[in-house]
Image (tube, rainbow, N blue to C red):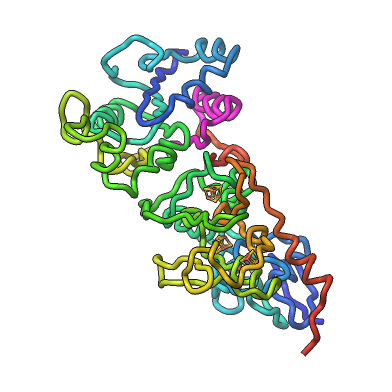
């Protein structure tokens, strides 16, 4: 059987979901037997590859760069997974949403010229940090902040076996 | 005794009991949020909606509808599950629920119900309203970002403590629970500091000071325990 082509991406999130993924520990060996990690913050590949089977995205859509990458990932991926609460609900990055963008950036960077307000050396900060499904179609949702390794594994195993992943109520808990 | 059917099970109920009471006695679970034993029912959240088959499938809140002879009640169906999930999604979309660092994380009735009813995401756009937090009270705080306007605090304060500190101010999505006439809670001349509102609150909106993320456990059953211990004059 050919290996499932899996990618992961990191948007506005704390990397906790990726840490939880690494906490699969010895189950990573089983993962490696069934899947090929074709793009991820933990592998050194710059371009998002074509025809990916499953992409897990951690984090909310917070910048113009996320918008572009998300559109590209959606085009090139069969199954898109919102990975963790920030991707599913906006979660912690969405705390800034009730506050105007300029105010947030000035509070962080002080007065004077601040990065992120306009498109420049760093991507523009979007007015609000949004869940993925507010921008593109999302196929599956894996909540949790971060999703515990057991939950990730339960979900991934079903996906790798070509099944529709199903999660029990206790695995749907936010927070 | 009144005879009715709930989910095709024949059930006997006392006159004056609600459909929710009858279902509970028959071991049939109907999810609730604004309902709290010991407080008067208000039918505010609509999570307990049930379908009455012999009323053309009309939807009624089980917590606020008295039993009637011959009612044919559907308490659990795909339609009801979908409606209840939609109600929850609207509650989540309306305020800012960030469970990951909420005081009530892991002890929240709203969070529990969302998981129970299979809510893996919210299909409505989030409103992200700018809402205040009032920490002026010496012992407690209220974070309007987490409030679902169930009114359990309002009823616990008026019906059990008798202080009548809490009320609703504003209309529609701009409604906020407010102490006295909208003063900071800490300035309230009526609040006795008893904390019944905090225990009655199903979410992280009302909390005890000094509680960190996930530390605010609630004891809502305290309300029923108190009312049972001091029955009121029958009138
Ligand atoms: S009140 Fe409940 S649902 Fe809302 S953020 Fe807190 S834990 Fe989550
Ligand atoms: S602490 Fe007691 S008196 Fe004060 S608002 Fe809450 S219920 Fe009312
Ligand atoms: S503060 Fe708590 S008990 Fe009061 S209305 Fe809001 S959610 Fe309900
Ligand atoms: S519990 Fe019945 S309407 Fe809220």
Q: Which residues, given as a range, are shown in magenta?
A: A140-163
Question: Can I make out residue A109 in this image?
Answer: yes
Residue B196 % position (x, y): 68, 63
Q: Which one is in front, B184 or A145?
A: B184
Q: Quadrant of residue B19?
A: bottom right
> Is A161 colored magenta in this rendering?
yes
Picture residue at 59% right of the left edge, 41% below the top: B212
Q: In this view, does A30 lie above or below B9?
A: above
Residue B200 % position (x, y): 66, 61
Picture residue at 27% right of the left edge, 37% below the top: A105
Residue that extends furthest to the right in the rendered view of this protein = B229
Q: Which one is in front, B51 or B17?
A: B17
Residue A22 % position (x, y): 52, 17
Question: Total number of numbered labels?
Answer: 0
Picture residue at 50% right of the left edge, 21% below the top: A19
> Is B78 colored magenta in this rendering?
no
Q: In this view, does A92 lie above or below B110?
A: above
């Amino acid at each position: 059987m050919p290996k499932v082509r899996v990618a992961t991406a990191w948007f506005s999130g704390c990397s906790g979901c990726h840490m939880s993924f690494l906490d699969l520990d010895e189950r990573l060996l089983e993962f490696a037997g069934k899947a090929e990690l074709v793009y991820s913050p933990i592998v050194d590949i710059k371009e998002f590859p074509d025809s990916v089977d499953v992409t897990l995205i951690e984090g909310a859509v917070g910048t113009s760069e996320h918008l572009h990458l998300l559109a590209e990932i959606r085009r090139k991926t069969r199954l898109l997974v919102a990975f963790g609460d920030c991707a599913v609900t906006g979660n912690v990055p969405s705390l800034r949403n009730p506050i105007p963008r300029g105010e947030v950036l000035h509070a962080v960077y002080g007065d004077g010229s601040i990065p992120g307000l306009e498109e420049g050396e760093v991507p523009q900060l979007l007015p609000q940090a949004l869940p993925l499904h507010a921008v593109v179609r999302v196929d599956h949702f894996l909540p949790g902040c971060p999703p515990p390794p057991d939950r990730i594994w339960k979900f991934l195993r079903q996906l790798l076996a070509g099944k529709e992943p199903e999660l029990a109520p206790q695995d749907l808990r936010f927070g | 005794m009144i005879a009715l059917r709930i989910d095709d099970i024949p059930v006997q109920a006392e006159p004056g009991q609600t459909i929710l009471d009858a279902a509970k006695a028959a071991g049939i679970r109907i999810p609730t949020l604004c309902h709290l034993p010991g407080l008067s029912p208000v039918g505010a959240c609509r999570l307990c909606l049930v379908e009455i088959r012999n009323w053309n499938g009309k939807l009624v809140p089980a917590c606020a509808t008295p039993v009637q002879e011959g009612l044919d009640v559907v308490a659990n169906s795909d339609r009801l599950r979908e409606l209840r999930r939609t109600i929850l999604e609207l509650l989540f979309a309306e305020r800012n629920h960030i469970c990951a660092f909420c005081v009530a994380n892991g002890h929240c009735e709203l969070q529990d119900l969302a998981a129970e009813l299979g809510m893996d995401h919210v299909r409505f756009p989030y409103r992200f309203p700018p809402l205040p937090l009032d920490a002026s009270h010496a012992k407690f705080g209220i974070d309007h970002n987490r409030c679902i306007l169930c009114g359990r605090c309002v009823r616990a304060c008026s019906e059990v403590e008798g202080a009548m500190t809490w009320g609703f101010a504003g209309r529609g999505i701009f409604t906020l629970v407010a102490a006295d006439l909208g003063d900071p809670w800490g300035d309230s001349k009526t609040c006795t500091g008893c904390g019944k509102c905090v225990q009655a609150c199903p979410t992280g909106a009302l909390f005890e000071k000094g509680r960190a993320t996930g530390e605010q456990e609630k004891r809502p059953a305290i309300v029923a325990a108190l009312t049972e211990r001091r029955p009121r004059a029958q009138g």
